[in-house]
Amino acid sequence: MNPATKLSDLEVGVRVRRIKGILRRKNAEDIYTASYTLGETLRSPDAIFEGLRFDVNGQHRPSWFCYAKHPERRYDKASGKSIVTPDGQIFLAFVNDKGVVYNWTFEDSDRCALTDGKYLPDDYKDRFGKQVYGRGQT
């Protein structure tokens, strides 16, 4: 989903070496998450944030996006079988300014937002510049 148009007219990609690394490790959870959960999150996020106040390297990234979703299902580490995503978990996909998905992960949901029925990343008010899509935009 393109945060500017709210349509599915934004093309993003994943680096080939990232996919090859996942396939080399032969971890079923990672393969299914990259194959299904990542696409689902990018197509129909619960929220999109613009501007990372800090990334995994501590860098400020004002034009990068974070797509957040509480998917109905996730995948078991040991077996790769589909299981229900716990209420307190949210999936995050980070997209850089070149349209490359550079990271994705499951994290804890913000407990205050969860009590209002919204699935938002923990500490979202301090982590991101602004929410550009989703219920209860901040």
Image (tube, helix red, strand yellow):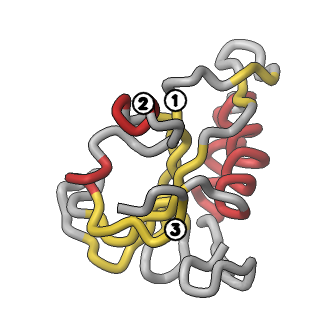
Q: Dot 2: within a 10 Å radius of its alpha carbon, few (fewer than 14), some, or many (20 or more) residues?
A: some
Q: Is residue 66 left or right of residue 5?
A: left
Which badge, 3 or 2, comes first in the chain's sequence?
2
Which badge, 2 or 1, comes first in the chain's sequence?
1
- Residue sitting at x 59%, y 53%: 46
Q: 108 and 114: which one is in front? A: 114
Q: Dot 3: within a 10 Å radius of its alpha carbon, few (fewer than 14), some, or many (20 or more) residues?
A: many
Q: Could you say which quadrant of the image residue 6 lies in?
A: bottom right
Q: Single out the residue that lies furthest toward the right.
A: 81
Q: How far apart in space, not on screen, are marks 2 and 1 (Cα)?
A: 5 Å
Q: How far apart in space, not on screen, are marks 3 and 1 (Cα)?
A: 19 Å
Residue 89's tag is 1
User: What amino acid type should be assigned to the residue bearing mark 1?
Assistant: Gln
Quadrant where the C terminus lies?
Answer: bottom left
Q: How far apart in space, not on screen, are marks 3 and 2 (Cα)?
A: 20 Å
Is the residue 137 above or below the residue 37 in the image?
A: below
Quadrant where the N terminus lies?
Answer: bottom right
Q: Single out the residue that lies furthest toward the top.
A: 78
Q: Secondary structure at mark 2?
A: strand
Is the residue 7 above or below the residue 113 in the image?
A: below
Residue wearing tag 2: 108
Q: Secondary structure at mark 1?
A: strand
User: What amino acid type should be assigned to the residue bearing mark 3?
Assistant: Tyr
Is the residue 79 above or below the residue 19 in the image?
A: above
User: What amino acid type should be assigned to the residue bearing mark 2?
Assistant: Asp
Q: Secondary structure at mark 3?
A: strand
- Residue sitting at x 34%, y 38%: 122
Residue 73's tag is none
Q: Position of residue 39 (x, y in %)?
A: 73, 56
- Residue sitting at x 73%, y 21%: 84
Residues marked 3 and 2 touching at CB (< 8 Å): no
Residue wearing tag 3: 133
